């Protein structure tokens, strides 16, 4: 059976998706989860893009033990120098160089001739090879390139030391049969390709990224570049979970598999959603809330009789937790540890203590605690790391009604000191957020707000997701959980502000000062 390498670019191409930016601790947390997932290569970023990108690639290189860590670089010495300096601390470093090869890109973007492109590929691949044995070369817009010229580009890259040749469908233009034909052509016409991995990087502009990747595997590709939840530029990338489970479910067709631990798929998907604040669509294949749900009476009857009548995979195959849970408010820490361990979560003592405190609080509010509830608590904990200057939500009181002023009282703790304030707003959340702004004397703008039910029933956990921005326009995602949606929303807002504080973005601090209850001037708002 053929072994297909998984090249995960969630932290590079995926992060370029609008609204999916991550800060450094979030990137490291996601990288560690990708390592647990069992991907072969983590593309940690584009080191030359910014000082923060360089820092994140460098930090991920130090944090990851078992995966290859790659940095993207254009075919220029400055890019390659930055990429190497960022990944040189990795146990398994890779430099990923790219250059466009389609006529439209060469003429209008690069302003280079074919001869110049061929020479640049040879020179810069060799330059990258002088630092690192593991070199990947990508021909940007390969699927719209002249095939004979493209084969010569790859031949030059192999001669210069490339060990992986990536064939991107950069704008999602190809059909599956075209991608398969291109891979077969390159296998026949690129000198030395038999000594390299053949990779594909497919975008989803026409909804064919996964289909194109799978067709390429059938044609001989040995690596696929993909992202968790399919996030990425424009319509996104090929979805990691869909590729992995296609190969695993239809081994009779592909005769191929990956090294991915499928039981970590759902956890990886939920963690990414939790970090970015981008909800998973209910109908999303493999990990969506409806992926293993059955409403039709005919379907329900079939599943009850034999699950395989309508389920080609088990939910547990991809790590979706079962909803049966015996823990309650009288359960102890050892029982909680055992249950989490059975779900695949091996927590250190400090993390377990944090989860246990929140578990006890939840158990006082809910009659039945499900596996999904526990997973939500664990994921939320990864967003609650306390840093100097950060705030902790303590309590709130809301007064609202038709024809009445909407007022909110909020109490926070910061650096060991409690603070409280009251504000009036157009609604209960507006009032609560203004009270927080007032206490912290910060100009924070709410850009977006969303609320999801993570579990079922009248006492379901609500997950609030906010995006907040500061004076320089940089956006931060905050999440909060509670059976009380107002509390979840305030927690999310405070979580977002903590990320602002953690970033050291002092431009968020306002110059305005409180002028008394119900009359605080902040930017253009008066309340």
Image: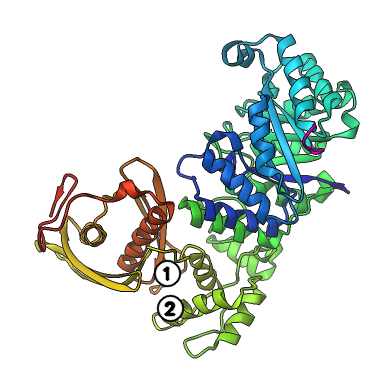
Q: Earlier in the sequence, mark 1 or mark 2?
A: 2
Q: Residue at image x 57%, y 12%?
A: 108
The picture places residue 452, in percent across and down from the top left corner, at 41, 59
On screen, residue 491 versus residue 283, left or right, reads left
Q: Are marks 1 and 2 in contact (CB under 8 Å)?
A: yes
Magenta part of the protein: which range? 130-134
Give the camera-side residue of 26 and 403: 26
Near mark 1 (Cα within 10 A), the count class, few <14, some 14-19 or many ≥20, is many
In-image side of 116 versus 377 (left or right)? right
Question: How much space separates mark 1 and mark 2, taking CA atoms?
Answer: 9 Å
In which image quadrant can residue 159 be found?
top right
Magenta residue check for 133: yes
Residue beneath disc 1: 461
Identify whether 249 is placed above or below 138.
below
User: Which residue has dot 2 on it?
Assistant: 362
Q: Quadrant of residue 261?
A: bottom right
**Element class at badge 2:** helix
């Amino acid at each position: 059976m053929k072994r297909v390498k998984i090249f995960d670019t969630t932290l590079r191409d995926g992060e370029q998706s609008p609204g999916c930016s991550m800060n450094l601790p979030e990137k490291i947390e996601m990288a560690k989860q990708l390592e647990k997932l069992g991907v072969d290569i983590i593309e940690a970023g584009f080191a030359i893009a910014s000082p923060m990108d360089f820092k994140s690639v460098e930090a991920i290189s130090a944090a990851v033990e078992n995966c290859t860590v790659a940095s993207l670089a254009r075919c220029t010495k400055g890019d390659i120098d930055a990429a190497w300096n960022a990944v040189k601390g990795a146990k398994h470093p890779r430099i990923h160089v790219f250059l466009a090869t389609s006529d439209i890109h060469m003429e209008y973007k690069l302003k280079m001739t074919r001869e110049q492109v061929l020479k640049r590929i040879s020179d810069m691949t060799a330059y990258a090879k002088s630092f690192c044995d593991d070199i990947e070369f990508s021909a940007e817009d390969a699927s719209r390139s002249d095939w004979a010229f493209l084969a010569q580009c790859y031949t030059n890259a192999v001669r210069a030391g490339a060990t992986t040749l990536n064939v991107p469908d950069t704008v999602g233009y190809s059909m599956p049969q075209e991608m398969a034909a291109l891979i077969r052509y390159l296998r026949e016409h690129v000198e030395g390709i038999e000594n390299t991995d053949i990779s594909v990087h497919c975008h989803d502009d026409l909804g064919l990224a996964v289909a194109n990747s799978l067709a390429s595997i059938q044609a001989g590709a040995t690596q696929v570049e993909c992202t968790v939840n399919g996030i990425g530029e424009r319509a996104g990338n090929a979805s990691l979970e869909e590729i992995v489970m296609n190969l695993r479910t239809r081994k009779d067709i592909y005769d191929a598999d990956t090294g991915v631990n499928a039981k970590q798929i759902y956890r990886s998907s939920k963690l990414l959603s939790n970090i970015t604040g981008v909800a998973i669509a209910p109908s999303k294949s493999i990990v969506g809330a409806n992926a293993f749900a059955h409403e039709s009476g005919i379907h329900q009857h079939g599943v009850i009789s034999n699950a395989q009548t309508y389920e080609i995979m088990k939910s547990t195959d991809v790590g979706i937790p079962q909803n049966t849970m015996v823990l309650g408010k009288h359960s102890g820490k050892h029982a909680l540890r055992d249950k989490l361990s059975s779900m695949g979560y091996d927590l250190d003592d400090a993390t377990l203590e944090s989860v246990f405190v929140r578990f006890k609080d939840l158990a006082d509010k809910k009659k039945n605690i499900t596996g999904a509830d526990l997973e939500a608590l664990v994921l939320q904990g990864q967003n609650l790391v306390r840093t100097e200057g950060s705030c902790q939500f303590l309590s709130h009181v809301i007064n609202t009604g038709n024809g009445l002023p909407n007022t909110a009282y909020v109490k926070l703790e910061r650096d060991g000191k409690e603070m409280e304030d009251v504000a009036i707003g157009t609604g209960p959340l507006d009032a609560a957020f203004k009270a927080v702004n007032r206490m912290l004397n910060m100009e924070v703008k709410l850009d977006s707000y969303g609320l999801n039910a993570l579990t079922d029933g009248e006492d379901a956990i609500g997950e609030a997701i906010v995006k907040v921005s500061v004076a320089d326009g940089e956006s931060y995602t905050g999440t909060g959980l509670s059976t009380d949606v107002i509390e979840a929303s305030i927690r999310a807002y405070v979580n977002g502000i903590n990320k602002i504080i953690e970033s050291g973005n002092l431009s968020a601090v306002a110059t305005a000062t409180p002028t008394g209850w119900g009359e605080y001037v902040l930017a253009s708002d008066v309340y």
